[in-house]
Amino acid sequence: MLAVLLAAVLLSGCSSYRDITVGTCRLESISPKGLKAVDAGISAEVDNPANEITISGISGTVYYEDDEIGFFEAPEVTVPGRTSSKVDILIRATLSDSLSLMQIMSMASGFKTERLTLDISMTVKVKGGLKRKIELKGLPVDNFIGKVSYESV
């Protein structure tokens, strides 16, 4: 998820921010919150040679074959500037109220991650610089799943 957030920063056009790299991503924790939500802790090694970046208002929708299946949100994330550091992010994912138990069961039998997409919205603020709201639609989730290590869960 952090890779998605930083990709949005890179798309904002500042050339020094194109040098930001995301290294190892790890799923640190996962815990159910009732029957319809889960909290996931993710960490990533980030090399940011530019100024500090704050990403806030992080939220989005997850789709399976164009059907809305859930929502996610995350608190503000700060990526320290001019350093390599570990960045932690906590994501709360919630199943859509319109999703029935029958739909979940039918999806589970033929579930394929390449059918998942997401829309994401966030505000990116560069320390001492610009602030911009970014919205990305139809991002394939499969592109990010392979980049996360699950060893520690």
Image (spheres, helix red, strand yellow):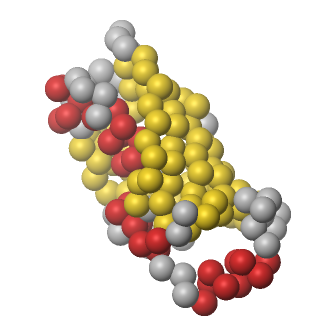
Residue 126, given in percent of the width and then of the height, sits at 37, 19
Rendered image quadrant of residue 153 = bottom right
Residue 13 position within the rendered picture, expressed as x and y whole percent measured from the top left? 24, 26
**Residue situated furthest right in the rendering:** 34
Residue reaching furthest to the bottom: 109
Residue drawn where x is 36% and y is 23% of the image: 52
Query: What's the residue at 47%, 25% (across, down)?
Result: 133
Whether residue 80 is situated above or below residue 2 in the rendered picture: above
As rendered, which of 82 and 39 lies closer to the eye? 39
Q: Residue at x 62, y 44 (%)?
A: 73
Q: Residue at position x 81%, y 68% from top?
A: 35
**Would you place residue 130 above or below residue 153 in this image?**
above
Kindly indicate the quadrant of the structure image that contains residue 34: bottom right
Question: In the figure, is residue 44 to the left or right of 107?
Answer: left
Total numbered labels: 0
| Location of residue 75 in the rendering, given as x and y in whole percent from the top left corner | 61, 37
Question: Along the horizontal axis of the image, is 31 left or right of 61?
Answer: right
- Establish if 153 lies above or below 54: below
Q: Can the viewer see residue 18 in this picture?
A: yes
Residue 141 place in picture, x, y as percent: 44, 62
In this rendering, would 5 be left or right of 68? left
Would residue 78 be seen by someone viewing this image from the given angle? no
Does 112 sit above or below residue 2?
A: below
On screen, residue 144 versus residue 133, left or right, reads left
